Structures are given as C-alpha cells and as structure tokens.
C-alpha cells in the first residue's frame, strides 16, 4: 500500500469519527483555494469527505448526479462546477456557510 493511500485512509477515518473535523478540514482547504494547487487540494478534501460519508455511489444518489460524472468531477483532474460542488457539499451534510 502506498504512503498516499495510507494518508487518504487515515483522513477518511478521521472524518468518519469526528463530524466536526469534516467541516474544519474543508474550511481549511477552502481558505487555501487561491494558493497554488489550492483548487486540486479542495477537490481532494471534498473527495475525502465524500468517501467518509458513504462514497461516490451514495453521494451520487443523494445529489442526482450520475456516478461517472461525480467520479470524474472529484478526480485529481476534475473540474466540477460550483453547482456540483454545492450539491456534493450539501449531500455530505455540510454547507458552504459552515466551511467559508
């Protein structure tokens, strides 16, 4: 198992075990959006929260976004729309107000 995978699994477990951590984690990623690599870091953080909240399949069902579209949007090369990000954030039980 790679170091990155271990990190991802650790972060996902932390989010699962501490609901307040999810909001704080996304808030920090949101604050760093304007920095170099900030967009990719925010998408990665959102993907971690999605995985902790049931995974792509569960969030796709909650949002009505197709599984493939959501998977592509949250991939490292993804470019989700603001509408998609808002739907995903809400489906995880959070709001942009909570992370901004």
Image: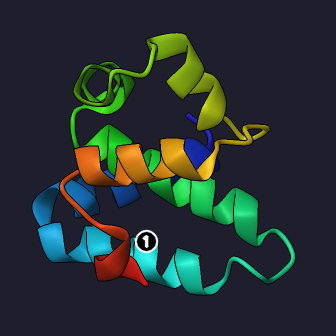
From the image, which quarter does the C terminus lie in?
A: bottom left
Which residue is denoted by mark 1 in the rendering? 26
Left of 36 or right of it: where is 23?
Answer: left
Picture layout, residue 41 above or below residue 68: below
* Camera-nearest residue between 40 and 10: 40
Left of 44 or right of it: where is 96?
Answer: left
Residue sitting at 28 percent across and 52 percent down? 90
Question: Residue 94 at x, y = what percent?
Answer: 24, 63
- Residue 35 seen by the camera: yes
Question: Residue 91 at x, y = what percent?
Answer: 25, 44
Badge 1 crowding class, 10 Å Cα cut-off, few under 14, some 14 to 19, many 20 or more, is many
- Residue 6 seen by the camera: no
Q: Residue furthest right?
A: 36
Residue sitting at 36 percent across and 54 percent down? 89
Q: Residue furthest front?
A: 83
Left of 12 or right of it: where is 68?
Answer: right
* Camera-nearest residue between 78 and 10: 78
Quadrant in the picture for residue 68: top right
Question: Residue 11 at x, y = what percent?
Answer: 38, 59
What secondary structure is found at the residue carrying circle 1?
helix
Residue sitting at 43 percent across and 71 percent down? 26
Question: Residue 61 at x, y = what percent?
Answer: 26, 19
């Amino acid at each position: 198992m790679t170091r990155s995978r271990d990190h991802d699994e650790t972060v996902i477990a932390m989010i699962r075990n501490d609901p307040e951590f999810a909001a704080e984690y996304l808030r920090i990623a949101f604050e760093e959006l304007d920095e170099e690599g900030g967009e990719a870091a925010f998408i990665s953080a959102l993907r971690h929260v999605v995985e902790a909240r049931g995974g792509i399949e569960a969030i796709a069902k909650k949002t009505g976004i197709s599984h493939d579209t959501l998977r592509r949007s949250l991939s490292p090369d993804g470019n989700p729309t603001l509408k998609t990000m808002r739907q995903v954030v809400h489906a995880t039980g959070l709001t942009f107000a909570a992370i901004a």
